[in-house]
Structures are given as C-alpha cells and as structure tokens.
Image (tube, rainbow, N blue to C red):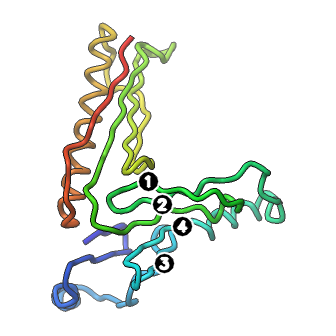
C-alpha cells in the first residue's frame, strides 16, 4: 500500500488480497474506490495487460508547464529523443524516434532480474558561508534514474574522507530502502552496485 496525503495505491499479486484490504480499510475510514489507478501525483498510468507492460508518463503536467510559459506549440528539436523503456526490473531499451519530450516515459514489465546501481559523491566544504559539504547520490534501475538527492550535510566535516563517508552512508540507506521496495513487489533482486567518487 502506498499512501500520499489522501491518495492511495494498493498493489498485490491477487485481486482477492486487494479487495480484502479495501474492505478492512472502508470499515475504519470513509473511502471512495476509484477503481484501477489511472493517475497519481501527476503521473499517468497506462496499462497494456496483453503484453504485461505498465507505462508511466507526466505528459499532462509537462503540457501544462509548456502552456504556462507559452511554449505549448513548440516543435521538438531535430535531435532524436531516446525514450527509455525499463523492463521491471530491467533491461534498458531505446527506440530512435523523433517525438516531443512530453511523450517520454518509463515502461515497466517482464521477469528479468533487477539491476539497481547507485552513485555517491560529495564536495568538501562546498558551501562558502557554512563550510558544510554537499551530499549527492543517484540510483538507476536498468539505466534510468529512479531516485536522487543533493543536499548540504547536517554538520561540518573535518576532512574529505569524512564528507565522502557521510554521503556514502546516505546512499547506502537509500539502497536498503530500494532493496525493500523491489523485494516487496515480489521481484528477483540483486544487491545494488554502489559507486562513489574519490579525489
């Protein structure tokens, strides 16, 4: 079950389990069942049940932003955009088709093993006012970014090594969370590869 404020998604291997949970929740809370999810947090969810694929897109949000800045009639640039398709988890596929950026999304499906890769780095004392270092990490699933963070570290570090360890610690915590998420989805999981930069 995924909950964000008053929006909720329920996923399970069997429909019976979903119906059972909905029944239990509706006893305790006033709820409205909107059926199969079509949109959440600005993401459109499109299913291809025949091919067992799930497509996530932010087309509507992107088009609203373009309209807001008077760019809704803009044409795609001549450079081909490579829409990324992830087999969940994860073989990376791409098709060279010219299409607008708003049409790019993620495609999940298939039964291959998951390959999660994380990258971690820090800049020692990068903030000139506080002398705090920056923690940065990014995680990819099949080559596409699924999680990232860039923030000042909470304390002043005394060395580049300490700053790197603090950044790496944050990245490892995110990797553990991703491991739990993928495992909860019932997918084959391999421990994430974690790469960190060192100067």
Which type of secondary structure does the marked residue at label 1 adopt? Answer: strand
Residue 132 figure quarter: top left
Q: CA distance from mark 1 to mark 2?
A: 6 Å
Q: CA distance from mark 4 to mark 3?
A: 8 Å
Which of the marked residues, 2 or 4, is nearer the chain's N terminus? 4
- Closer to us: mark 4 or mark 1? 1
Give whichever of 98, 76 is nearer the camera: 98
Q: CA distance from mark 2 to mark 4?
A: 11 Å
- Mark 4 in CB contact with mark 3 (< 8 angstroms): yes
User: Dot 1 surroundings within 10 Å: few (below 14), some, or many (20 or more)?
Assistant: some
- Mark 1 in CB contact with mark 2 (< 8 angstroms): yes
- Mark 4 in CB contact with mark 1 (< 8 angstroms): no
Q: Which mark is residue 57?
A: 4
Q: Which mark is residue 85?
A: 2
Which type of secondary structure does the marked residue at label 4 adopt? Answer: strand
Residue 54 figure quarter: bottom left
Q: CA distance from mark 1 to mark 3?
A: 19 Å
Q: Looking at the image, is 136 positioned above or below residue 174?
A: above
Which of the marked residues, 3 or 2, is nearer the chain's N terminus? 3
Which of the marked residues, 1 or 3, is nearer the chain's N terminus? 3
Q: Position of residue 29 (x, y in %)?
A: 24, 85
- Residue located at (29% from left, 48% from top): 115
Q: Which residue is mark 3?
A: 46
Q: CA distance from mark 4 to mark 1?
A: 17 Å
On the picture, is 21 further left or further right than 141? left
Q: Which residue is mark 1?
A: 92
Q: Looking at the image, is 90 positioned above or below residue 198?
A: below
User: Dot 4 surroundings within 10 Å: few (below 14), some, or many (20 or more)?
Assistant: some
Residue 30 figure quarter: bottom left
């Amino acid at each position: 079950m995924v909950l964000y404020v008053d929006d909720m998604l329920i996923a399970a291997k069997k429909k019976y389990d979903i119906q059972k949970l909905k029944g239990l929740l509706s006893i305790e809370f006033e709820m409205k069942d909107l059926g199969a999810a079509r949109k959440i947090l600005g993401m459109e969810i499109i299913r291809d049940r025949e091919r067992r694929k799930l497509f996530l897109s932010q087309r509507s949000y992107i088009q609203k932003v373009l309209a807001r800045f008077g760019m809704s009639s803009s044409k795609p640039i001549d450079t081909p955009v490579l829409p990324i398709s992830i087999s969940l988890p994860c073989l990376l596929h791409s098709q060279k088709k010219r299409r607008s950026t708003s049409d790019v999304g993620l495609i999940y499906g298939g039964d291959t093993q998951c390959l999660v890769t994380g990258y971690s780095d820090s800049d020692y004392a990068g903030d000139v006012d506080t002398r705090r270092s920056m923690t940065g990490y990014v995680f990819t699933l099949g080559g596409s970014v699924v999680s990232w963070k860039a923030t000042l570290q909470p304390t002043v570090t005394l060395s580049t090594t300490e700053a790197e360890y603090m950044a790496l610690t944050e990245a490892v915590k995110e990797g553990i969370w991703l491991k739990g998420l993928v495992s909860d989805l019932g997918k084959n999981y391999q421990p994430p590869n974690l790469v960190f930069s060192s100067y």
